[in-house]
């Protein structure tokens, strides 16, 4: 088992120099990949850096001499013994994984990308738990190694179950059963989290002192059963942490789980003595943590408030200002809107989740090109938490071919909105809600928003006038004198508008 474990991952206590060089080269490619993914212009190149980094890492592992020397005699419960048996095992598993990944990538819609990312994070956590179990069973009992395994298994279990719950919340319905996006706040939830944390620390001390399977048991159990118990408890903690987080906080949850998966990989690197896993895990973990901080800042939320489901926060009450109708809603049709757009010199488009659901990004791109051909200055305003995934709108617009230089972040364009002729809000709600600035009693109070109501004209594309945003707050923008509502499915309404233009 020891040879199998280290052979498959290419991890041995004394790695050959060429293998170390290959792993360092792969680490450099992963760093370049992360740098490339920091902007839309270089994202494609960044993806290729990551692909070649993984190819180099896998290739270096395949060429490790221990793999070529392995036979099925090294594997319990398997008869036979021909040279290079591990190559067949590795190639077969890689081929199966590659086919599954290709099918998932081919079939997934961009609207389903958030739940796919959450599901992929769960794979990282489950792999860490299984590799931790394998390493614990195959390694001689050492205190430091036992601690490394324990940290890897605990973080992996939290990542696995938390990611599965996040996937279910984002998907909304699993096996025909409705999964609510609202937070589930159990009585005494913070004391429950604290009790679980104390329990995990206690079990960690028992495992560190108990050692391997052949040492005297602690409290009637050897170390491995304690490790399984810890994995189960950590898994329950992962479930409890994510069910207490509301659907509106899902962009932060996805980035947090991304960070967890990175730290899990880094812990596995220390456990297995693999420099590449340490480097890659640290990159993913730290970048995910930074992204989570940016997302929380964009929502005016504390990271602790999100992670622990409102820890230390007072109960928010919805004031009368944000309840019920607040005036008359004025409609507009495609023909009248097209006439106004033809006379506008500056136009800003604010995309939201409604555009993603309708898959209207290509129609929006056509719309943009028509207006620019007419001489209008057209730009996009992107809120950091628009959609259900960090960068969700940027990815959709890039997929449709919208030029990168006209896609601007909230801080870059907010000051220009008062001088804008028309702002088109396509499927967004909470991120353009003025109550965030005017009503301290609403759930989005203090959240930075796009101040679209300051434009000369705002047009909101929405399925219907009923229903509040994901945060459940009414939007006074709909009732303002300078606002018009253009109702219907975003794809249908944009196609009709393009025809009028």
Image: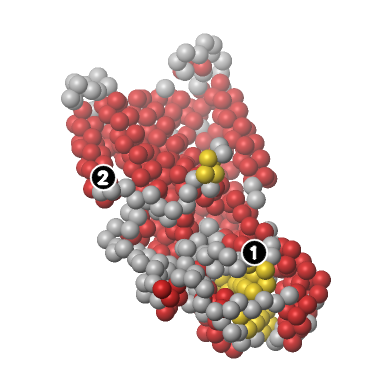
Element assignment for label 2: helix
Residue 282, percent from left and from top: 40, 52
Q: Which quadrant holds residue 102?
A: top right
Q: Which mark is residue 192?
A: 2
Dot placed on the residue nearer the N-terminal end, 2 or 1: 2
Give the residue at mark 1.
Answer: 463
Graded by Cα atoms within 10 Å as few (under 14), some (14 to 19) or many (20 or more), the crowding at tag 1 reads some
Residue 267 appears in the picture as rendered:
no
Quarter of the image that includes the N terminus:
top left
Residue at 54% x, 44% y is 173
Vertical arrangement, residue 69 with respect to residue 344, above or below:
above
Graded by Cα atoms within 10 Å as few (under 14), some (14 to 19) or many (20 or more), the crowding at tag 2 reads some
Vertical arrangement, residue 424 with respect to residue 227, above or below:
below
Element assignment for label 1: loop
Residue 243, percent from left and from top: 40, 48
Vertical arrangement, residue 115 with respect to residue 236, above or below:
below
- Is 408 left or right of 255, judged from the image as shown? right
């Amino acid at each position: 088992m020891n040879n199998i474990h280290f052979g498959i991952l290419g991890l041995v206590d004394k790695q050959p120099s060429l293998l170390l060089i290959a792993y360092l080269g792969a680490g450099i490619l992963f760093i370049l990949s992360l740098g490339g993914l920091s902007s839309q212009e270089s994202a494609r190149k960044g993806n290729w850096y990551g692909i070649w980094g993984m190819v180099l890492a896998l290739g270096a592992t395949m060429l490790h001499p221990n793999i070529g020397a392995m036979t099925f005699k090294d594997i319990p419960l398997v008869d036979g013994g021909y040279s290079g048996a591990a190559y067949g095992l590795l190639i077969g598993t890689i081929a199966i994984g590659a086919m599954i990944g290709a099918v998932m990538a081919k079939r997934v819609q961009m609207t389903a990308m958030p739940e796919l990312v959450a599901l992929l994070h769960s794979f990282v956590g489950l792999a860490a738990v299984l590799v931790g179990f394998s390493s614990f069973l195959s390694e001689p009992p050492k205190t430091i190694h036992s601690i490394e395994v324990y940290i890897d298994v605990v973080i992996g279990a939290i990542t696995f179950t938390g990611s599965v719950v996040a996937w279910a919340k984002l998907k909304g319905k699993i096996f025909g059963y409705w999964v609510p996006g609202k937070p589930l706040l159990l009585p005494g939830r913070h004391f429950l989290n604290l009790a679980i944390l104390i329990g995990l620390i206690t079990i960690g001390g028992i495992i560190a002192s108990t050692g391997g399977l052949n040492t005297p048991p602690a409290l009637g159990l050897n170390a491995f059963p304690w490790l399984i118990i810890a994995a189960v408890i950590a898994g329950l903690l992962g479930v409890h942490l994510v069910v207490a987080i509301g659907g509106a906080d899902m962009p932060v949850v996805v980035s947090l789980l991304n960070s967890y998966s990175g730290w899990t990989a880094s812990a596995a690197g220390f456990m297995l003595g693999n420099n590449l896993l340490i480097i890659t895990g640290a990159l993913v973990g730290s970048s995910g943590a930074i992204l989570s901080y940016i997302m929380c800042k964009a929502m005016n939320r504390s990271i602790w408030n999100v992670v622990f489901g409102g820890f230390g926060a007072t109960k928010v009450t919805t004031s009368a200002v944000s309840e019920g109708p607040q005036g008359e809603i004025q409609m507009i049709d495609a023909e009248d809107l097209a006439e106004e757009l033809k006379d506008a010199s500056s136009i800003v488009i604010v995309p939201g989740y409604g555009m993603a659901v309708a898959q209207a990004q290509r129609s929006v791109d056509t719309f943009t090109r028509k207006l620019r051909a007419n001489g209008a200055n057209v730009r996009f305003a992107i809120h950091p938490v628009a959609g259900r995934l960090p960068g969700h709108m940027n990815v959709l617009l890039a997929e449709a071919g919208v030029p990168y230089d006209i896609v601007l972040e909230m801080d870059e364009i907010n000051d220009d909105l008062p001088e804008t002729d028309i702002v088109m809000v396509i499927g967004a709600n909470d991120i353009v809600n003025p109550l965030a600035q005017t009503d301290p009693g609403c759930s989005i109070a203090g959240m930075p928003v796009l101040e679209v109501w300051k434009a000369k004209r705002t047009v909101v594309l929405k399925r219907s006038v009923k229903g509040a945003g994901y945060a459940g707050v009414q939007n006074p923008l709909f009732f303002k004198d300078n606002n018009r509502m253009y109702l219907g499915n975003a794809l249908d309404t944009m196609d009709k508008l393009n025809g009028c233009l």
